[in-house]
Image (spheres, rainbow, N blue to C red):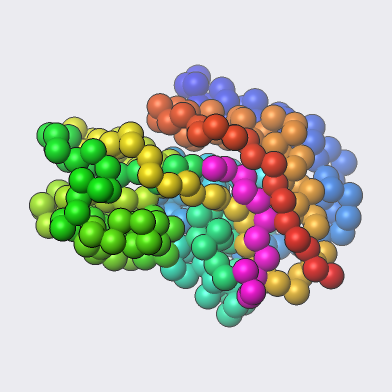
Amino acid sequence: MSTRQLVGAALASALALSVGGCTGGSVGSVGTPGPRALRIGVPLDQPGVGLRVGSEYTGFDIDVARDLATRLGVAPDRITWVPMTDLTADTLISTGQADLIVGTGAAQAPADRVTFVGPYLLARQDLLVPTAATTVTGPRSLTGKEVCVVSGSGADATIRDDYPGVQLRELGSYPSCISALLDGSVEAVAGPDAVLAGLALQAPVSPLVRVLGRPFGTQAYGITMAKDDGALCERVTTALAEMIRDGSWQLFFTADLASMGYHAAAGNPPKPRATCSS
């Protein structure tokens, strides 16, 4: 059995203990009535974070979302995964296409329209560069050059505010940015280092790119929901705190991110917070 399978088996056992006695999907481990089904927006093009291959969904955001659903009393087969980009997170909530958003897009959504619970991960913003690049030392070294960012990712705002001399090419997905990097039309890709770490390991690009390792900003991962759903907010906040306290968070991190060689920034796992309105 592989290391990932062993971790998965341990995780399944831990979750079985944490939700023992929950039947019918109506009451979660938080001890209050919960939804019977959930539509959860997640990224699906980020290896190690949120990825769909055929009918299989994997990654840290996916595992966090499944765990939250379980603690809310929602069975895995009652989750509908909704593809999300950082730019569409707010829209998915405001139009009723998703009940929860899990990922970096949650942190970017306007606070006056949605409620943010978290963070559940503090990542760093960094650069993905060609392996042979020797002159790139950070965003400042890219003044007058073009850097690809995913619209709404957070890294776009950091570079725009702090490094105005850098030219941004804003695209809709990380695979699109990787293509631009490989064809030489941009000098680097900016984004959360957790995402960049997974992209850098994917064949056939893995020998051609590397994470620079010179962070220039922070990136919060969290959960977003409708502003007026105070009851769900309270349950999610409690469930997220339980996940971190009982060691499930660490199991997910080990299986999904540490297995890629990713090291968590200081302050992880963070202490979740939320301002829930009834």
- Residue 146 shows in the view: yes
Residues 222 and 56: in front is 222
Q: Is residue 124 above or below residue 27?
A: above
Percent position (x, y) of residue 277? 80, 68
Give the left or right position of residue 109, taking residue 20 as reference.
Answer: left
Please state which of residues 73 and 181 is positioned toward the viewer in this rendering.
181
**If the image is split into quadrants, where does the C terminus sit?**
bottom right
Query: Residue at position x 65%, y 60% from top?
Result: 116
Predominant SS of the magenta segment: strand
Residue 42 seen in this snapshot: no
Q: Residue at x 57, y 26 (%)?
A: 7
Any magenta on residue 83? no
Outermost residue, bottom side: 95
Residue shown at 46%/29% (left/top)?
263
Based on the displayed image, in which of its 4 quarters is residue 230 positioned?
bottom right
Please state the total of marks drawn on the protein image.
0
Q: In the image, residue 28 lies at what x, y percent?
A: 82, 50
Q: Is residue 20 left or right of residue 218?
A: right
Residue drawn 31% across and 51% down?
A: 190
Highlighted magenta segment, given as a residue range: 111-122
- Residue 203 in picture, x, y percent from top left: 24, 38
> Quadrant location of residue 26?
bottom right
Q: Is 19 placed left or right of 41 in the picture?
A: right
Q: Position of residue 214 (x, y in %)?
A: 33, 36
